[in-house]
Image (spheres, coloured by chain):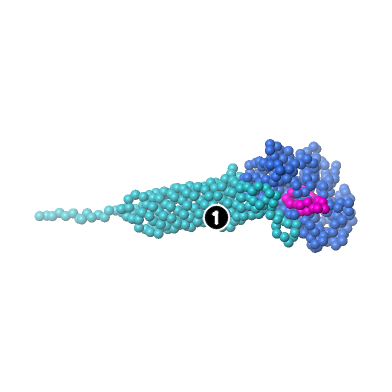
Chain colours: A blue, B cyan
Amino acid sequence: MSRRIAACLVAVGLVAGASAPLSAYLQLSVTVRGSVTPVKWTSVPVRWFSSTASAPGVTSAQFQSALAAAFDTWEAVPTASIAFQFAGFTSATPSEDNDGRSVMGFEDHGDLDRTLAATGFTIDTITGAIVESDVFFNTAFAWSTTGASTAFDLQSVATHEIGHFIGLGHSALGETEMQAAGGRRVIAAASVMFPIAFGRGNALGRMLQPDDVAGASASYPDGDFDRDTGSVQGRVRLGSRGLFGAHVSAFDRRTGALVGGFALNEAGDFVIDGLAPGTYVIRVEPLDDASTDSFFDDPGLDTNFRATFYDRVVAVPAGGAGPSFDVTVTAK
Amino acid sequence: MLALTAPAAAQARRAAAPPRFEAGGGGGAIGAISLGERDANLLTNDAAGSPYRLYATETRLQPAAAVEARLGYRVTPRLIAEARLTVARPSLRVSISADAENASPVDATSQLTEYVVEGGALWRLSTDARRRWIPFVSGGAGLARHVHEARALVENGVEGYAGGGALYALGSRQAASPARTGLRFDVRLHMLHGGIAEGAGLSPRVVATTSAFIAF
């Protein structure tokens, strides 16, 4: 039995409710036999097809090449055991669900004027395994594989969507500003999984950041990942209550790596996994740089508190976690 | 008349064997180490632009009191080979500032226990046993271990030092023999590499100690 869920870039998408399991990263989830279960591929290599459709400025061959490069980027994560296989070109489109093929391709979705691309899934609701995943790239926007300043970089957006393809949700490591015409513009980001894309001509989204690497590795760990990395854990509190949905980030003061996580239950509990052993600065902030429904489907998310630093340096060991700690924030 | 004469009993007093080993202990202070500055940066929405600073950090290992124990072997009248263990409890401090969303600046801290085991040499600048003050120079290297709170993390680095000081002999100086007890005043420049200083290059700090010693 299967069910289709969708995850989008620059649009509504993710599903992770207040009862989501405590995990280091926001993962796309379904309810399986009453419990919320992260979705993931259970066998590799994951086969994918490239649509024969083209778009102005991008041939089908260029499209396939850009997608292959994006898949290679994720496959090259040394601490993750995920692999992909290009299975060929197809005239099928991404919207043709449940055809047994994971299809990447251009599609016209002029009605989605804020959606660059979207990833859909067919899930085995008995096991939570991804059966099929299709990604469309909206031809309502201009695309480029050569860095043209007037178009969105296809490989960058593909890298983001493939993060969803493997089951990752959005990262909140980014800063945005409101635009006069409505919506938000990203100022900066430290994760390709930030829900709002860089602007036209910017190809920085092709490179995975430490947050992305940690997320992929936590979902598909290679043999040494758990042994060689550690985690921080604790609770976010606002007064006497836990604070669900707070964004927590860990900064490696030695390497500059930034990895994010979330308080995933009403007690405010969080875990940030996949950290290199060392000492970290912990920062807590509200989810106010993108629509909260880019992260959670809880409409009552509290974002009315100040960004706060934890006043202790947190040590992360290899293969474990340091003692749990509380970070208390204050209302604005 | 038979005169009996005894051989001149001008036996030279048998000189006491100079002490070969020296043990000492005492305390002092270890100086601060700068462990560098690093910004928490994001990639900007401008491929040609500078990184976007989310906040700034500056890390220091704070000064602390230290205790030390030492064992030496007098190789020559001037040269002593020695081993030393120093233990201190410095605080690691990360000063966080300039947050892009105006989070209040904070000095985040944690308590460490530092163990330094070193081997080195001391060179006396005088062998005049009648002198009460004898200056010296010293140098050596060893291992530095920093243990974080709850032993959550242990970091090992290497450390080298060079310095000098003075020995002060206690007791009578009339006998021309090396002092068997005394005080020792050390000032050393240490250079830490790796371990807690990983990524900060060679990290210098000054250490000053006073100790008592006994030679045997």
Could you tell me which quadrant the N terminus of chain A lies in?
A: top right
Can I make out residue B6 in this image? yes
Quarter of the figure with the C terminus of chain A: top right
Q: Left or right? Give the position of B185 relative to A280.
A: left
Q: Residue A82 location in percent, x, y?
A: 75, 51
Q: Is residue A326 above or below residue A190?
A: above
Reply yes or no: does residue A51 show up in magenta. Answer: no
Q: Chain of mark 1?
A: B
Q: Could you say where residue B200 lies in the image, as x and y percent from the top left?
A: 59, 56
* Residue A140 position in % (x across, y down): 87, 56
Count the marks: 1
Type of the residue with mark 1? Leu
Taking the image as shown, residue A93 lies to the left or right of residue A179, namely right
**x then y, percent, for residue B94:** 61, 50
Which span of residues is magenta-colored? A164-186
| Residue A290 relative to residue A239: left or right | right
Question: Residue at the spot x=72%, y=56% of the render?
Answer: B43
Mark 1, Cα crowd under 10 Å, few <14 / some 14-19 / many 20+, is many
Q: Is residue A283 left or right of residue B161?
A: right
Residue B75 location, quadrant: bottom left
The residue located at (66%, 54%) in the rendering is B39
> B128 or B31, which is in the foreground?
B31
The residue that appears at 23% across and 55% down in the rendered structure is B10
Residue of label 1: B192
Q: Secondary structure at mark 1?
A: strand
Q: Between residues B160 and A152, which one lies in front from this camera angle? A: A152
Residue depicted at 45% across the width and 57% down the height: B164
Asked if residue B140 shows in the view, the reply is no
